[in-house]
C-alpha cells in the first residue's frame, strides 16, 4: 500500500506489541483510530522532510516533491513497524497527559524510544518510491445482469492497474445480494491519474475473494460474472512494490 492510502496499521495490529492497549483505550476513553491517524500524519511529515533533504538526483520526483508530497511512498514492513510503535508512543503520551500516571509515562518513554529505533531502521532500509503510483481503490459499485444462479451474497474488492502492469492496493470488501436469476456486475469508480484498468476480486466470503479477471478491465468498463461462475484466482496483493529506495541519514547542506 501507499502511505497516502490510509493507516499502515489497524487497532488489532497494535495488540502484537501491546496486549493491553484496547483495555487501556477503553478505560482512558482514548480513540485509537484517531491516534493511528495522527501517527500516520506525523510519519508522513517526517518522511517528506527526509525526502526533501535527499540529494536531488536520487529522487525521481525531486523537482515536484513539495507538490507531490508522499503520494508515491510505499509502506514497507519497516515503516509499518515504525507506525505501530509511534502510534503506541502517541497513545501513551495522551494517556499520561490525561492521568499523570507514572506507569503511562514509562510506557510512553519505552515506545518513544522503540519508535525512534524503528525510524532509523526504516531510513536505513530505505524509503520506497514508485514511479507510477496508484492510489488504493474505493469500494466497487454493483449491478446485476440476467443469469441462471440462485440468490447469493457476493463479496468483492477491486484494485487499479497501470500501463506497466503494476497493481495498487485493493479496496475494502463490500457486499452485494444478487437476486435469483442474475449474475453480479462490478464497476470501479474514481480512477487515479495513472490508472489504465482494474482487477476484480469476488468470493462468497470475505476471506475467499480471488481475482476473476485474467486481464484488467479497461477504465469505464464493467466486469460481469460469466455463466461458469466464480474461478479460483490469485488473492488480493498488498499493492505496489517500490521502484527505488532512498536511504541514509541527514544530508549536509553546502553553505
Image (cartoon, rainbow, N blue to C red):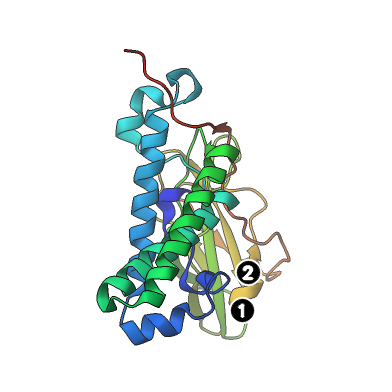
Relative to residue 199, is residue 101 drawn left or right?
Answer: left
User: What label does residue 102 carry, if any?
Assistant: none
Relative to residue 12, is residue 41 drawn left or right?
Answer: left
Task: Give the residue at the far left of this rendering.
Answer: 98
Does 211 sit above or below residue 220? below
Q: Is residue 214 visible?
A: yes
The residue at 26%/76% (across/down) is 98
Q: Is residue 70 visible?
A: no
Relative to residue 49, is residue 111 drawn left or right?
Answer: right
Q: Nearer the viewer, residue 232 or 44?
A: 44
Q: Position of residue 244 (x, y in %)?
A: 57, 31
Q: Position of residue 149 (x, y in %)?
A: 63, 80
Task: Give the residue at the far front of this rendering.
Answer: 102
Q: Position of residue 85 (x, y in %)?
A: 48, 61
Task: Give the residue at the far right of this rendering.
Answer: 232
Q: Nearer the viewer, residue 202 or 9?
A: 9
User: What label does residue 205 carry, if any?
Assistant: 1
Q: Secondary structure at mark 2?
A: loop
Q: Position of residue 198 (x, y in %)?
A: 53, 51
Does 210 sit above or below residue 240? below
Q: Nearer the viewer, residue 15 or 101?
A: 101
Q: Residues within 10 Å of mark 2 (few under 14, many from 20)?
A: many
User: What label does residue 209 carry, if any?
Assistant: 2
Q: Are marks 1 and 2 in contact (CB under 8 Å)?
A: yes
Does 208 sit above or below residue 70? below
The residue at 42%/62% (across/down) is 109
Alpha carbon distance from label 1 to label 2: 7 Å
Q: Secondary structure at mark 1?
A: loop
Amino acid at each position: 500500500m501507499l502511505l497516502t492510502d490510509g493507516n499502515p496499521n489497524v487497532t488489532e495490529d497494535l495488540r502484537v506489541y501491546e496486549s493491553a492497549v484496547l483495555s487501556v483505550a477503553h478505560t482512558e476513553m482514548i480513540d485509537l483510530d484517531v491516534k493511528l491517524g495522527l501517527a500516520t500524519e506525523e510519519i508522513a511529515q517526517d518522511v517528506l522532510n527526509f525526502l526533501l533533504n535527499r540529494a536531488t538526483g536520487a529522487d525521481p520526483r525531486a523537482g515536484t516533491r513539495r507538490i507531490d508530497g508522499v503520494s508515491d511512498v510505499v509502506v514497507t514492513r519497516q515503516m509499518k513497524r515504525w507506525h505501530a510503535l509511534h502510534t503506541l508512543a502517541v497513545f501513551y503520551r495522551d494517556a499520561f497527559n490525561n492521568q499523570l500516571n507514572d506507569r503511562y509515562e514509562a510506557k510512553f518513554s519505552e515506545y518513544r524510544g522503540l519508535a525512534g529505533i524503528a525510524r532509523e531502521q526504516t531510513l536505513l532500509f530505505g524509503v520506497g518510491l514508485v514511479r507510477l503510483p496508484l492510489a488504493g481503490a474505493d469500494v466497487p459499485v454493483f449491478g446485476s445482469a440476467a443469469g441462471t444462479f440462485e440468490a447469493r451474497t457476493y463479496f468483492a474488492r477491486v484494485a487499479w492497474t497501470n500501463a506497466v502492469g503494476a497493481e495498487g492496493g485493493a479496496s475494502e470488501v463490500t457486499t452485494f445480494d444478487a437476486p435469483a436469476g442474475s449474475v453480479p456486475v462490478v464497476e470501479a469508480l474514481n480512477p487515479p491519474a495513472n490508472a489504465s484498468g482494474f482487477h476484480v476480486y469476488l468470493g462468497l466470503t470475505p476471506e475467499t475473494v480471488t481475482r476473476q479477471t485474467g486481464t484488467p478491465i479497461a477504465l469505464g468498463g464493467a466486469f460481469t460474472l460469466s455463466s461458469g461462475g466464480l474461478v479460483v484466482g490469485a488473492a488480493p496483493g498488498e499493492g505496489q512494490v517500490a521502484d527505488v529506495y532512498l536511504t541514509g541519514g541527514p544530508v549536509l547542506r553546502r553553505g
